[in-house]
Image: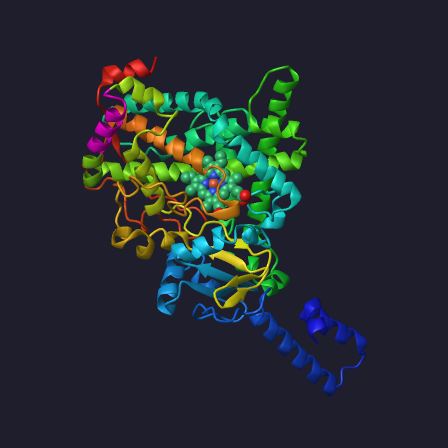
Amino acid sequence: MEQLAKISPFETVLEFGRGSSVLSPGTIGVLLLLIIWALFKQATQTQVPKIPKIPDAPDALPFVGNLMTLGGRLNENDSTIYSRWSKNLSSDIFQMRLGSERAVVANTFSTIKDLWVGHSNDLIDKPQQHGFTEKLEYDLSGANMTEAIRRCRKAATRALGKSLWPTYYHLLEPASVSLTRELLSKGDEYMDIYPYLRHIVFDLALSLTYGTVSNGVDDEFTDALVESINQISYFRASTQRLRDYVPILRLLIPDFASGNAVVAAEKRRQEHLDVIFDALKKRIASGEQVDCIVNGLVKDNLSEPEIHGTCKALLQAAPDSTASSMYVVIGWLSIPTGQEFQSELYDAILASYDGDRDKAWEMAFREESVELLVSLYKETLRFWTTTPYSLPRTTVKDISYWDTVIPKGTTMIMNAQQANHDTAWYGDDALEFKPTRFIGKTDSLPHLTFGAGSRICPAAALSNRIIYALIARLVLAFKINEPKDLNARKANADMLDFSAEYRSLVAMPRRFDVSFSPRDEIWIRTKML
Ligand code: HEM
């Protein structure tokens, strides 16, 4: 019987049907029993058995398990729901059913550290999301750690390493100058700075990968590429699509809208990248020296799909997560408490360079000598967890955890949003935004927004530096103001409500407007030369 169930209950029933030309009442009875039994198995079974001694999330339903409460269906992101379950169960860790997938959710900093760092190599694979993963040609972020993916990750990590940063300054510095010029031209006008921040990070990622930049914030080609990237991000590791997790739905319902949307987005993304790649090949063939990751990967003999797979992951991961973090902190700086902090930060930046504004401006991308600003970006990433449940992993072997065993093949989810606000780890003020929190602290894992362990974000240090440098230059040049008009869009600095996106992997801050008053216009203009 166990054997038959593995084939698929419906195939089993069909086999019975084929074997008998006339269905006797006895055969029909057996068939019915078999269908009920097969449905029962489908309704409750998971890829790994229930794990002893780990409590279950409440209200699991047949077939879908806990999915009906997740995926933004209650206008809350999955992490907020996980936090509630963890609290109600009085347990750091619980298990749940996502259709046929058994997942363990860890909710406190110390539990996550024990599992993700203590068992780093045991948690190196990613869950394969049916209806999504197979529609992407090659995908570093979502793939298991095969030999090819190991090579891609190694190449990406090398390209993002500190020794290569000096080659990226010439990309970031002009971008920050054009941003400053743009802000200066706006005068007292209130504006939404998000598209500009996103554009800077996207251009950096495009230069790093394919050695090119886009044409501008409203460039049509880039918009289409960004749109295809967004579509793919929207479905990645999301619990919104039931059929990605429930086998019987895949069997019964064809994959219409969203499945086709992923395929169409992947096709569009690939077409655009092919154009960019071809242009790069022509430049290289004509003898031009182009410093970019693709060039390095070609020299490393990675295949073309591997090259695109690595670069797609970098292009995909970079813009929204980095831009969102800069955006929320700019929003906080504009509100009254942030206004006071702006002056403190301005003084701290100048003090680090003995009052030499030019040097402070020049060194922004080259070093992180302003401790208050380092603490500010760490606290920003901790408090507004833009990747609330990180990227789920899969165990590649059985893991002994306290007095139980988490089996090989279990989906592992870190509730980074909850752990980043864990009072047992950060103290009673964990729910406050405290920009000085990390002064004098050198912990290598200050928060979990970049993930942890074997698949931690390879761009964590570079992203930190981008945020540090752009904020340093903004504060040196301008005072950031919130709109006076009561009906205007003001920043939402709430640790959860800052984002209006409940369904997908990356939080999307609610949009707001701010204005930038030059501290000293004549001095700023000297930086535009
Ligand atoms: C503030 C900005 C960023 C945040 C919060 C962020 C967050 C994350 C997180 C949570 C993961 C999953 C880690 C894990 O499984 O433990 C990840 C993976 C990844 N990130 Fe980032 N990221 C950021 C910026 C970037 C940038 C700028 C790039 C590229 C230039 C990048 C490239 C990647 C790649 C390639 C992966 C997949 C690594 C793998 O699966 O082996 N990220 N990121």
**Magenta span of residues:** 342-355
Left or right, 511 with reference to 460: left
* Residue 97 image point, x, y percent: 51, 65
Q: Main secondary structure of the magenta part?
A: helix
* Residue 21 image point, x, y percent: 81, 78
Q: Is residue 20 above or below residue 492?
A: below
* Residue 94 image point, x, y percent: 45, 65
Left or right, 19 with reference to 289: right
Q: Is residue 5 magenta?
A: no
| Residue toward you, 20 or 373 | 373
Q: Residue at x 52, y 54 (%)?
A: 119
Q: Is residue 304 above or below residue 453?
A: above
* Residue 263 image point, x, y percent: 60, 45
Where the C terminus falls, by quadrant? Answer: top left
Q: Residue at x 40, y 22 (%)?
A: 173
Q: Residue 366 is drawn in which quadrant? A: top left
| Residue toward you, 116 or 518 | 116
Is residue 295 visible in the rendered image? The answer is yes
Q: Is residue 350 magenta?
A: yes
Left or right, 113 with reference to 275: left
Is residue 268 visible in the rendered image? The answer is no
| Residue toward you, 44 or 83 | 83
